[in-house]
Image (cartoon, rainbow, N blue to C red):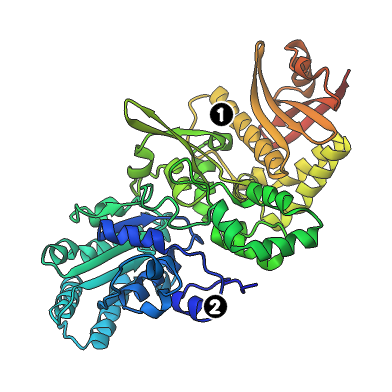
Amino acid sequence: MKFLPVGRQNFEGIINENLLYVDKTRQVYNLIRQGQLYFMSRPRRFGKSLLVSLFKHLFSGKKELFKDLYIGKETDYDFQEYPVLQFNFANYGAKVTNLEEILSSELDRLAADFNVSINTVSLSLQFQKLVENIAQKGKPVVLLIDEYDKPIVDFLTEVEQARINQGILRRFFGPLKGLESAGHLRFLFITGVSKFSKVSLFSDLNNLTDISIHTLSHDLLGITQEELVENFREHITSVATKFDVTEEELLINMKKWYNGYSYNGETRLYNPFSLLQFFLNQKFSYYWFATGTPTFLVETIRDRGISPREYEQVKANEDFLTKFSLEDLNMSGLLFQTGYLTIKDIVYRKFIPYYNLSYPNMEVRHAMMSNLVEAFTFKPSSTTNTSLIKMQDALEEGSVEQFINALKVILSSLKYNWQPPKQYKSEEELLRMWEGYFHAILYVITSYMEMFVEAEIAHYKGRLDLVAETEEYIYLMEFKMDGTAKEALAQIKTREYAVPYQNSDKKVFLVGINFSNEERNVEDWEAEEYY
């Protein structure tokens, strides 16, 4: 059984140490044969840096590393050696405010490595001269740029600094078109998480092919089901033995937890990071979630008054992939690029693609709900987890009172930490806003607990606010703001929201909850069993 390359991003080290490697050189070969200037966005922890390392060693002519892979055994690739320049913006640190100085030093270092002179004060001319002088020695340059957008993404909540770094990058990448036209570039590969800044940074390079959702890249990164079974067979057997289940049962659960990413609506992928961590630890857990989530994502959802349930099913056209600016972030597109949403399927209308997006799997959905709970309640997970466990236990045991008591604890910081981000014209509008806010909190809390949850269920007499279902109980919840719990409970009855559940084998509870606008918490509640 081969050892797992956990945390490894150096292709040469993985091959020389005979670590497990899923062969992607068929896709790489097709990419090289069909073009030479590429841009691709993918979420964090998806294998971008390992792919860049593969390109580095491939274009460095290290044929021996590829002798047992597809490109070495099945193709006529010549393994010529080219000068390779690699820039990894993730290596320059977090929240960089001296980007120009760092890039200038990096160019000086590379010039020394290749023994060329780039004496000039302009950053863009330094870059231009570096590539020109290296290429003039005999062969065009291979340029690999990893995590290009980090100096911008790090400052999405500090727009002025983001704009400064964007300007520096625009000047730095400015010479690319001229270098390509002059024949100084053999291959260019640019990767990062987002593409919202791609247009402004590389707009002059009009023959740069974006393969983010292209047929050339649908399985270039990530692990398909077939690749999982073929390459991880011994690890699958080992974990199945530990859990005392069949391999088929294990694979079904692995698919629910970690599979589901797609960039063409058909091919489903595992995040390599989560997969490796699963086999290393031999247990189901939220590995990708533990690597961190940009706080601004969930805070923006909260402050814009977006209902989190909107992201269960998102319909979009191609604009969600391309129209971004620092001042007006497209949340659906950004959630897609950061890996929280993925393409479930693509529908063509008069040859124009329309995309249906949703969470890829249980792991990612849980990560999103956990972060939304923190954002909407203004409590860290270390504080909310205890209350959430109590709430889950209460619902699984049929105790509405315990559920409400734990909910009050979670909401206790709300009054002192958040005010609506805009002025409302009337008290009625403000009340509707707060009612929607509490709806959102109950939705993300029950969703976080991995229950079957539906919000605003359409009924012929109206809409029920929330249905939460456990193995033994169903809870039909109606919320009021500055009303009474009795009114909420009466509404469930008069509108006959419980009728569809009257033949259920589970116990059904009708729950009315009234929130106080002044206290920002539960004011009163009533519950009764439905017979």
Say how many tags the image has. 2
Mark 2 residue crowding within 10 angstroms, few (<14) / some (14–19) / many (20+): few
Is residue 325 depicted above or below 520 in this figure?
Answer: below
Quarter of the image where one finds residue 79? bottom left
The residue type indicated by label 1 comes to Leu
Q: Residue at x 75, y 34 (%)?
A: 522
Q: Earlier in the sequence, mark 1 or mark 2?
A: 2
- Give the left or right position of residue 493, taking residue 23 as reference: right
Q: Where residue 18 is drawn, which disc sits there?
A: 2
Is residue 259 depicted above or below 184 in this figure?
Answer: above
Residue 231 drawn at (x, y percent): 58, 63
Q: Which residue is drawn at 18% across and 86% down?
A: 116
Task: Give the label, 1 or 2, closer to the camera.
Answer: 2
The residue type indicated by label 2 comes to Asn
Residue 13 drawn at (x, y percent): 49, 79
Query: Which residue is tagged 1?
Result: 430
Question: What secondary structure is marked by label 2?
Answer: loop
Q: Which residue is drawn at 40% across and 42% down?
A: 330
